[in-house]
Amino acid sequence: MQYQKIISGTTVIEFHNSLWGEETIKVNGQEVSKAKSIMGAEHFFTVVENNEEARYVLVTKVDSQMQPLLDLFRNGIPIKHNLVINYGKPPQNEYKKKGILFLNKYKLEEAESQFLKALDIDSFDAELYLYLACIYSLRENSLKGYEYLLKAKQKNLCDLSVFETNDMLAFLRIQEAFEGFKSSGYNSYDVSLMPTISKGDSGKEVK
């Protein structure tokens, strides 16, 4: 097993290679690429950084001594070259895992508690903000839901299409504010279009 973590500005890239040669790339907590490999592979992914697309290529390979290495390019410019990949397991955020289990069972209070604890461990994990948005959408609290969607975008969540496809976010999508939010590139929304009274307001601030 191999694991490597690379930080590029506000973007956290994690590489993991399993015992079976399955390479997985995560960016800010979200899986963006997967490939099976013995001698190496190429992974292409795009991250929106400061409202501009950054195109990454991560290349894995082995040297003549069979030492695993990686190269990382951002917009064609090398960031890492022949970086030795460490042996080890990827770190596990148990609070995140428990939170997902609770959320899938619609135990919203328990899920929120776990996700907030998970944020204390890894505030770069954009998926955590997405899951919290799901919780507030299910509670029909549009204001908090949109705050967490915005935070997920600000934390460079790679696949923003989930805003339009995740069933748990359906309540947020039917709000008048959603089209403007989408048109802005998920950078701003009109609070005046939110319902006057939101349900499920726990009074907790968005981290």
Image: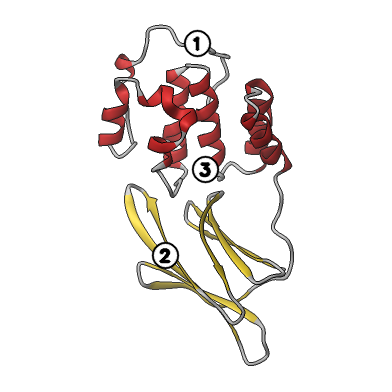
> Where residue 199 sits: x, y (%)?
50, 10
Q: Earlier in the sequence, mark 2 or mark 1?
A: 2
* Whole-number angstrom distance, CA of label 3 to CA of label 1: 24 Å
Task: Say which of marks 3 and 1 sits in front.
Answer: 1
Quarter of the view holding residue 17: bottom right
Q: Which residue is mark 3?
A: 126
* Whole-number angstrom distance, CA of label 2 to CA of label 1: 41 Å
Relative to residue 2, is residue 141 depicted above or below? above
* Whole-number angstrom distance, CA of label 3 to CA of label 2: 18 Å
Relative to residue 14, is residue 146 depicted above or below? above
> Where residue 43 sits: x, y (%)?
47, 68
Q: Earlier in the sequence, mark 3 or mark 1?
A: 3
Quarter of the view holding residue 121: top right
> Disc 2 marks which amino acid?
Tyr
Q: Residue at x 54, y 13 (%)?
A: 200
> Where residue 163 sits: x, y (%)?
41, 36
